[in-house]
Amino acid sequence: MGDKSVRKKQYILEKAREVFSQKGYKDVTMKDIVDACDISRGGLYLYFESTRQLFMEILQKEQEGDDIFSGKISENSTAAEILVLFLVEQKKEIIRKRNSLTKAIYEFYFQERPEKKEDIYRQDYDSAVKILQKVIEMGVANGELTCDKPEEAATNIMLTLEGLKVQSVTIGISAELIDKQFIYILSTLGVEDESDNA
């Protein structure tokens, strides 16, 4: 693929992401993408054959660019500081209404049921649980966190985050409620002093 084609494909993905963030997944048609990109239907089909293929590629790009820790953690960061940073970044994602793919992601999973090998969202979730587990284990080993079951704690944190994301796109959620949940998570791990930073 030449430079012009790569730029065109990237443009289509950016415009399609905007459409999915506005309309969700189930109501988006290839015509919506054609209109948003101001290209011909044939021009779109040169790059993508379906909204499903488009959305899968958008999810892949989201996962690739989703390193919230990049450049924000020093070598001297404690497990508690890493955990607080993770929760702060999650809060931003939960309360962000504009350009959020949350609704589209849930609709996609209800409608499409991707196979395990192509289930990018599940892979991202499982990876996050493992990273959180390692952070908690590191904190326990250093004596800064208390937790008998790091894997279960990490899973519980991720399930809480998923519940907050669902609530944010269905009935709405306040920053204060998110803070209360994060303070509770941190306090169950023995992090009292850091809770004001979430």
Image (cartoon, rainbow, N blue to C red):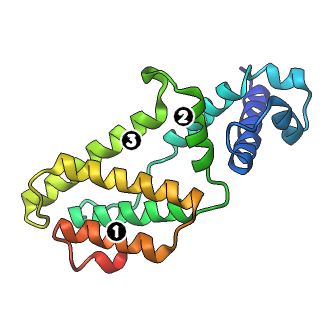
Amino acid bearing label 2: Tyr
Question: 84 or 188, which lies in front?
Answer: 188
188 versus 170 height, above or below: below
Dot 3 falls on a residue whose secondary structure is helix
Q: Earlier in the sequence, mark 2 or mark 1?
A: 2
Q: Quadrant of the N terminus?
A: top right
Q: Earlier in the sequence, mark 1 or mark 3?
A: 3
Amino acid bearing label 1: Phe
Distance in Å between CA atoms under marks 2 and 3? 14 Å
Q: Residue 170 in the image: x percent, y percent?
A: 58, 57
Question: 72 or 121, which lies in front?
Answer: 121
The residue sitting at 19% across, 46% down in the picture is: 151
User: Disc count in the image?
Assistant: 3
The residue carrying mark 2 is 109
The residue carrying mark 3 is 125
The residue carrying mark 1 is 182
Q: Residue 30 in the image: x percent, y percent?
A: 81, 29
Q: Is residue 170 visible?
A: yes
37 versus 163 height, above or below: above
The residue sitting at 88% across, 20% down in the picture is: 42
Distance in Å between CA atoms under marks 2 and 1? 26 Å
